[in-house]
Image (cartoon, rainbow, N blue to C red):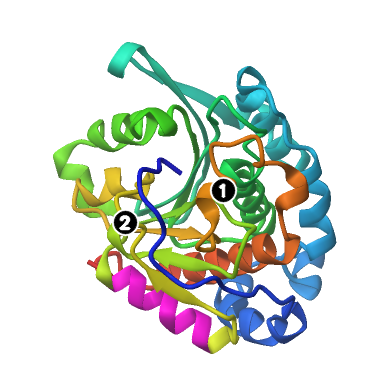
Amino acid sequence: MRASACLKEHALAHPDRSHLLAPALLALLLPLTSAMAGPADRAGPPMATPDDIAQDVLAVPCDNAQRQAAVRALYERMGANPADLRVERFSDRGGVENLVLVKPGRSPDTIVIGAHYDKTGDGCGAVDNWTGQVAAARLYQTLRDVALEKTLVFVAFGREEEGLVGSRAMANAIPEDRLPTYCGMVNIDSLGLARPQVADNMSTRPLLQLAVDVAKEMDIPFQHAALGRANSDSSAFVARTIPAVTIHGLDRHWMRVLHRREDQAARINPASVYLGYRMALAMVARLNQAPCNAYR
């Protein structure tokens, strides 16, 4: 999370209500799983658990130079073919690298699922933003073998903390005539301190409303508020008229943790990361099922 101001919202509790989520989420995912064949048809897609999330969080690398390789290893552990993971390099502001994994759908219509992998010098960057990488990789694992209508592009963005360099490079490289095929961008940044929330000032209104609707249907405790002058990678896509949303899990005391030595795995409540993963999964399911212009 690129931060320059305090979060203007109340501190939020983050109870583990995972036992309430399965029926609602399975109802949202049912249209996706109906096209699957073989044993997975009966078992359904693999869903992460809070315990899975807790173990993933502990694997956070504290050295910025190791982050990209650690994200690659995380996706490979989720079943990604190493050959499918590629680094996209851009010359913007001295050079930036994004790690990209594409899951083709039946159509070229595209949903981007993003989270930045870099961190600031202090702390381990566990909250900001290893939690986003964990949630995104678990989304990939869940949807890896599901036949989807739309193409999913998972992106680990570089140099977010220096001004959204990686996401701006990717968004600005999209040709003008391809913009209508980008149906939405779901950005995950800094879960773990509170219940899932949406950053209003980094999100388009239709996707904000989708998050509100999904949270209500799934009985997920949820809030949305502006993050002052803070920013994250969804803004790069909003600037290109692509529907986008940032899901986070910060409380009003987040500036005591982010970009400080206190940003450690021990500060993370795995239930908060888990709920963020489930909310993002449900939103991707809805985007996949809807016409590409439904949330513009």
What main secondary structure does the magenta stretch of the protein show?
helix
Q: Which residues are magenta?
A: 206-216
Q: Residues within 10 Å of mark 1 (few under 14, many from 20)?
A: few
Q: Amino acid at mark 1?
A: Arg
Residue 158 is left or right of residue 53, and the answer is left
Q: Quadrant of residue 129?
A: top right
The answer to whether residue 294 shows anywhere in this view is no
In reply to whether residue 210 is colored magenta, the answer given is: yes
* Quarter of the image that includes the C terminus: bottom left
Instruction: Give the total of numbered labels.
Output: 2
**According to the image, label 1 marks what residue?**
256
Q: Secondary structure at mark 1?
A: helix
Amino acid type at image mark 2: Gly
Q: What is the x, y in percent for residue 253? A: 54, 58
Question: Of the residues tagged 1 and 2, which is closer to the observer?
Answer: 1
The residue under label 2 is 228
Q: Identify the residue at image location x=72%, y=37%.
A: 74
- Residue 94 as seen in the image, left or right of residue 143: left
| Residue 174 seen in render | yes
Magenta stretch: includes residue 249: no
